[in-house]
Amino acid sequence: MSETVNKAKCCQGFDPAVWDGKEIVWQDKTFIKDRVASVFHIPLNFGAVITRMMKRIEADGVSATEPRCLSDENSLWGADLYVATPKEIPGAANVKLSGKFLTKVFEGDYKNMGAWIEQMRQMVVGRGKEIKKLYFHYATCPKCAKETGKRYTVIFAEI
């Protein structure tokens, strides 16, 4: 399923075709939730928060599921992170997400986010739908993106 292979094996392989232009329905999909501090949507402690979340999941003897992490950029000063899990994790902030989502894959620098959001909006409107909420899946960490030469972002539009 991996389009790119990285030696560090930090991040899972990513195949854009799996996520691009799809309609996904979730009914009570399980995630754990945590909060990242940001300044104007630039994360300050993303690495520390995701590491803490992954350790909590691994301590319970399970692995994160796809998509591994969704970011809800709900403030200039922070974002809620959701890591998908196969079950509730004791001691974590467990949440369930339900709804219908359209997805689109983008590749490139995060400075293009405004244009990507507009493209996502146009795709959703073109299908006769309306966006309720956006979530962002950053498919690789900066280290793996540098190694593979690809920086993918999947936008999930709840419709």
Image: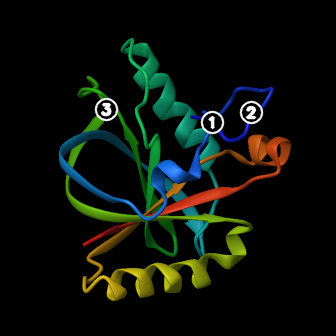
Numbered circle sitting on residue 2: 1
Numbered circle sitting on residue 5: 2
Q: Position of residue 40 (x, y in %)?
A: 60, 76
Q: Secondary structure at mark 1?
A: loop
| Residue depicted at x 54% and y 59% | 37
Q: Secondary structure at mark 3?
A: loop
Mark closest to the chain's N terminus, 2 or 3: 2
* Residue 132 drawn above or below residue 155: below
Q: Which of label 1 and label 3 is nearer to you? A: 1
41 displayed left or right of 111: left
Which quarter of the figure is the C terminus placed in? bottom left
Alpha carbons under labels 2 and 1: distance apart: 7 Å
Amino acid type at mark 1 = Ser
Dot 1 surroundings within 10 Å: few (below 14), some, or many (20 or more)? Answer: few
* Residue 137 drawn above or below residue 6: below
42 displayed left or right of 24: right
Mark closest to the chain's N terminus, 1 or 3: 1
Per the image, the residue denoted by label 3 is 92
Amino acid type at mark 2 = Val
Which quarter of the figure is the N terminus placed in? top right
148 displayed left or right of 90: right
Q: Nearer the viewer, residue 64 or 122?
A: 122
Residue 87: image quadrant is top left
Alpha carbons under labels 1 and 3: distance apart: 30 Å
Dot 2 surroundings within 10 Å: few (below 14), some, or many (20 or more)? Answer: some
| The residue positioned farthest toward the left in the image shown | 27
Marks 2,1: beta carbons within 8 A = yes
| Residue depicted at x 34% and y 31% | 85
Q: How many marks do you count on the picture?
A: 3
| Residue depicted at x 23% and y 42% | 29
